[in-house]
Amino acid sequence: YLDTAAFTKNGFQNRNRIRLSNKIDWLTVPILSKGFYNHPTKEIRINNQVDWKRKHLLTFRHNYGKYPYYSYVYDFLLNIYAREYHYLVSLNLALLTEIRKMLGISNKTFLASELNEHGTGTERLISLIKSVGGKSYISGQGAKKYLNDDLFRKERITLIYQVFSPECISPATKGSEVPLSILDVMFTLGPKTIDWLIGGTP
């Protein structure tokens, strides 16, 4: 988890897209942002003076209450939202950890802030990969614009560009012009979400 990455305004670090009635909109965690843009994400604090938890839970209830696996996902969200969070990274890690458990994903994870990180850009990524003994790096397509392929070859690290194109599109996301949060799929497919992610038939 790249908790040392700079916090960016209007990014995905504190918000994600979900379905709201017949449209798609952002679900946002309010932050204390003044003076903190471009600071490491691990330093970003949540604005708990705003009742964002209640708003989120009501949003899930109103928009996904009739979905097949509403209770399955909502119960796990209630457990997470019941805890106190002061830093954004703590909330994000809690969500990701529980979602991974629900999907049966158990590979070991690390925080960049706990590793031997140095340099910028591609050099920074390579230092993190080497810190955990990695031999390959999976990247999204958008990173082709700025990753230095030659540096990966020099360090004998295989660079793989992921093309996420599942064979089956869940009813929840079908017809969407933009990708939505994994929660949108989980409300529809529940424990079968992992099959959808790997391109199987749920």
Image (cartoon, grey):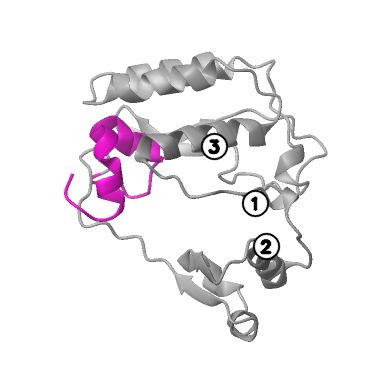
Q: Judging from the image, what secondary structure is the residue with disc 3 in?
A: strand
Mark 3 or mark 2, which has the lower sequence index? 3
Q: Are marks 2 and 1 in contact (CB under 8 Å)?
A: yes
Viewer-proximal residue among 199 and 176: 199
Residue type marked 3: Arg
Does 8 appear above or below 59? Answer: below
Q: Which residue sits at x=76%, y=49%? A: 38
Nearer to the camera, 181 or 62: 181
Report the residue marked by disc 2.
128
Q: Is residue 54 visible?
A: yes
> Over which residues does the magenta segment extend?
174-202
Q: Amino acid at mark 1?
A: Leu
Residue marked by disc 1: 2
Q: Is residue 201 magenta?
A: yes
Mark 2 or 1 closer to N-term?
A: 1
Please tell me how crowded label 3 is: few (under 14), some (14-19), or many (20+) other residues with Cα within 10 Å: some
Residue 5 visible to an observer of this rendering: no
The image shows residue 137, relative to residue 60, as above or below, that is below
> Could you tell me how far apart the alpha carbons at marks 1 and 3 are, in whole angstroms?
16 Å
Q: Position of residue 48 (x, y in %)?
A: 68, 18
Q: Are marks 1 and 3 in contact (CB under 8 Å)?
A: no
